[in-house]
Amino acid sequence: MKILTQICRVLVGVLFIISGLIKLNDPVGFSFKLEEYFSANVLNLTFLIPYALAMAVAIVIFEVLLGVMLLVGFKRKFTVWSLLIMIVFFTFLTLYSAVTGKVTDCGCFGDALHLTPWESFTKDVILLVLILVIFINRRYIKKIFKKPVVYTIVAAAFVFCCFLAYHVLNHLPVIDFRAYKVGTVIREGMAVPEGAPKSEYAITFVYKVNGVEKEFTDKELDKIPADAEYVDRKEVMIKEGYVPPIHDFVLDFNGEDMTEAVLSEPKIILVISYFLEKANDKGLAKIQKFADEAKAKGYKVIGLTASGSDVIEAKKKQHGITLDYYTCDATTLKTIERADPSIVVLRNGVVAQKAHWNDLEFLQLK
């Protein structure tokens, strides 16, 4: 049992550190996942949405620290109780997601590894078993170094996590795991391979028969009475087909689809602000000067946002911005870039450079 406890200790500690660091590399992305859980149609905890980013940073730092604390034997009782409470909570969330289907990816490993809800739940159940072994046999969890060394390691881990969080929030993720990372050919990311599996749907038709609504499957159409009155048609996906990494990149300008035109530009810069009303005003204040410099070097510069025309015009007037703003789905824009605003440089549909608004001066515009 002592050996088993030590094996579980190492497995849990390492997994918590890896999972935490992946999310700490992109806490904004994890905050989007928390917002999804807090939304009205999931847990209906909308009052927590404004605090999602702060909660995301705190959770992932604590996750990394718990892994470190477990490995070095720091504060044994506090550590094992915290691990147990955290895994019970996340097991509940992943079970809820799997049963309801309201959240399709728990975000356990950020964009580095996508798990289905049932895969996430299975992973948490395994972790729960490992942590229960540790909890029951916590007397075997001993410090692996002398007390001053253990305290120093935990303190150093905390300082490192805080520094990393500060860095990625004021710049960009150190490692980009998303579908729009530098070097991505957007057209290739949108392509569906020949022979790729297609989604399958169960189709049900609702008809009123003798004043009573009845449902008929698409295989029972011959059973529908001639005098039946059509009411509704329902589609339920029973098997999801192939979904390309990039599937919602659609740019609209004044009602016209400009996606292909943008991807065909040899030198174009996208100024992304998924919600202009929430965008950082210091960042927006730097945009026009940057755009003028880029245009002087032969670049076309456009804005991308999911905000309405009234917000666009108000923000343009406030900051003296003369860019044309194309509209795009907010989720897509959040996937492309985390900072609001941020910059993406495209060359013939290939992502050449990306930058946080804090780092505009480091872009190499040839």
Image (spheres, helix red, strand yellow):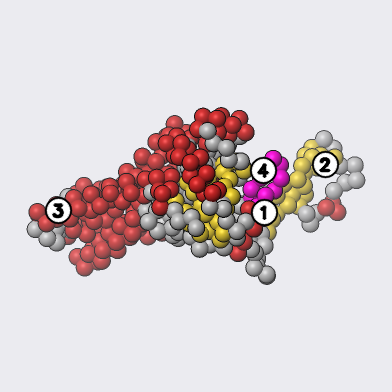
Query: What secondary structure is marked by label 2?
Result: strand
Instruction: Give above or below for 347 relative to 95.
Output: below
Left or right position of 11 against 99: left
Q: Label 1, label 4: how many angstroms apart (C-alpha)?
A: 11 Å
**Is 359 one of the magenta-colored residues?**
no
Residue on which disc 4 sits: 253
Which residue is found at the position 67% from the left and 53% from the top? 261
Q: Nearer the viewer, mark 1 or mark 3?
A: 1
> Of marks 1 and 3, which one's residue comes earlier in the chain?
3
> Of marks 1 and 2, which one's residue comes earlier in the chain?
2
Q: Label 4, label 2: how many angstroms apart (C-alpha)?
A: 38 Å
Image quadrant of residue 109? Answer: bottom left
Q: State whether residue 92 appears in this view.
A: no
Q: Are marks 1 and 3 in contact (CB under 8 Å)?
A: no
The magenta stretch is: 250-260
Query: What secondary structure is marked by label 3?
Result: helix
> Of marks 1 and 4, which one's residue comes earlier in the chain?
4
Residue 12 rendering spot, x and y as whole percentages: 30, 60
Residue 154 rendering spot, x and y as whole percentages: 19, 52
Query: What secondary structure is marked by label 1?
Result: helix
Q: Label 4, label 3: how many angstroms apart (C-alpha)?
A: 56 Å
Image quadrant of residue 255? Answer: top right
Q: Three-letter amino acid code at disc 2? A: Tyr
Which residue is found at the position 57% from the left and 56% from the top? 267
Q: Nearer the viewer, mark 4 or mark 2?
A: 4
Residue on which disc 2 sits: 230
Pointer 2: residues within 10 angstroms few (<14), some, or many (20+)?
A: some
